[in-house]
Amino acid sequence: MLGAKKLVSNVPSAEQTPMYRDYTKFALATLVIFLAAVILVNLIVDPYRIYPKISRFELEKSFSLFHHMRLHNAYAIEQVRPQHLIVGSSRSGVLSSQEMEAARGRAFNASMPGASLAEIKRAVEHAHATMPLESVIVGLDFNYMFQPTQIQIEAEDRWRKVNGNLSDKVRHSYQRFKDHWSSLLSVDSTINSSLALSDDGSSPFRFYEDGTWEIASTWSANRLYAVLAKQIFNDFRAHSDHFNTKELVKLLNFTDTNGVQVTLLISPMHGLLLQTIYLAGKWQQYLQWHRELVALVSGRNIAVAIYGLEDNALMVLGAIDAEDAAFVDGVHYKRKAGIEIVSCLVAPCISPLRPTRLDPQSIGLYLEQIDALRVRYVMENPAATAKLSKWLGFKPRSVK
């Protein structure tokens, strides 16, 4: 009986009911206002840069897109609708799409940090599904020598497919819903918007409207080269001599089928990092990779142009800390170099950074010049090569 009375006493009285209703309304109104404020801030700041017509932040001042380039590029391609595309890893991020646009037509750089050839192929297909492509420049990195056939692509359904079926379209739509949700209401986007609002200009990257982006690190050149040398040394030591070209063949099959002109650019390295490959015991393997790339390209029915830059003394022998150096860290170009390289790929030029067209007749001499420049760098820069040996933790070896 006492328990029944106690239970009854916990039920709100008629006088108390309006107070509970008012509290519920207030809580719901507060929640709605809070969520609306979060959406509004994320729309205005647009940390992943997928609403450029709404955003009031200049891209150069926005939060670093480095870890969100795959999300950003999928939408940027649809907004720009390029007829010409530049795509690759971070090493291709500074290749100027403005030079390409001036020579050929509307262009965009869709390079992504750590992009695999499988991702590059999907980006090219996405762009072609959005607006038929006429040409594409693809940056080829040494790590494509080793990549496995099966590569996981982050949020693959985000990228459009040419002639996709109903299932593809449904998955694509669902992925887009998740993208918009995460960009407007996720904790991650809200944190990134807050970081953008309090930006102090310390981001190690700079992003531009044409899709290009560059490294603007405050680290010294020696520190950057040391990090890259250790990474490259370990990458080469960890892999076998077997080359994987299946993903590149898939990419070229797609461009052949769809009539897209392809230019392949073998991303160059500074002489100090070429010596790193030699010290890793993989120098002949690296040269053979070039031969196999040229053989693969020359054996196709539709012409594919392939270029290299490591026979260029300015690229390979330049002082690592020089103001006019072509590289930031031995593998990533400076913005000026990226502009000159693309200008020479899309039109005749007289730049000292003009790439060399490679074919079965020229590849032998090209590789001889690379090896000669590597040896020359070691001979002319004993202090730098001594530092390299120290970074890698062993005594210097003979250069021959």
Image (tube, rainbow, N blue to C red):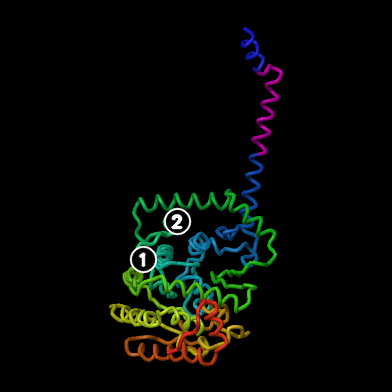
State which quadrant residue 62 falls in. bottom right
Which is nearer the eye, 283 or 262? 283
Query: Considering the numbered disc 2 on the image, is that residue within a helix, a strand or a loop?
Result: loop
Q: Is residue 11 above or below residue 123?
A: above
Q: Main secondary structure of the magenta part?
A: helix
User: Residue 306's x, y, as percent?
Assistant: 39, 81
Residue located beneath label 2 in the image: 155
25 in the magenta segment? yes
| Res. 36 image quadrant | top right
Of the image marks 1 and 2, the number of the one nearer the N terminus: 1
Measuring from the top left, give residue 37's x and y in whole percent.
66, 47
Q: Quadrant for the C terminus, please.
A: bottom left
Q: Residues within 10 Å of mark 2 (few under 14, many from 20)?
A: few
Residue occupying image coordinates x 49% and y 92%? 376
Task: Examine the rendered structure and indicate whether residue 91 appears above or below residue 186.
Answer: below
Distance, label 1 to label 2, CA atoms, is 19 Å
Q: Amino acid at mark 1?
A: Pro
Which residue is depicted at the point 58% across and 52% down? 188
Which residue has dot 1 on it?
148
**Highlighted range, magenta:** 11-30
**Residue type at mark 2?**
Ala
Q: Residue 147's x, y, as percent? A: 38, 68
Q: For the residues labelled 1 and 2, say whether their Cβ atoms are less than 8 Å apart.
A: no
Q: Residues within 10 Å of mark 1 (few under 14, many from 20)?
A: few
Q: Look at the image and tell me whether residue 136 can be seen.
A: no
The residue lying at 52 percent from left, 72 percent from top is 93
Q: Is residue 207 magenta?
A: no
Say if 62 sits above or below 94 in the image: above
Percent from the top left, x then y, of residue 91? 50, 74
Quadrant holding the N terminus: top right
Q: Secondary structure at mark 1?
A: loop
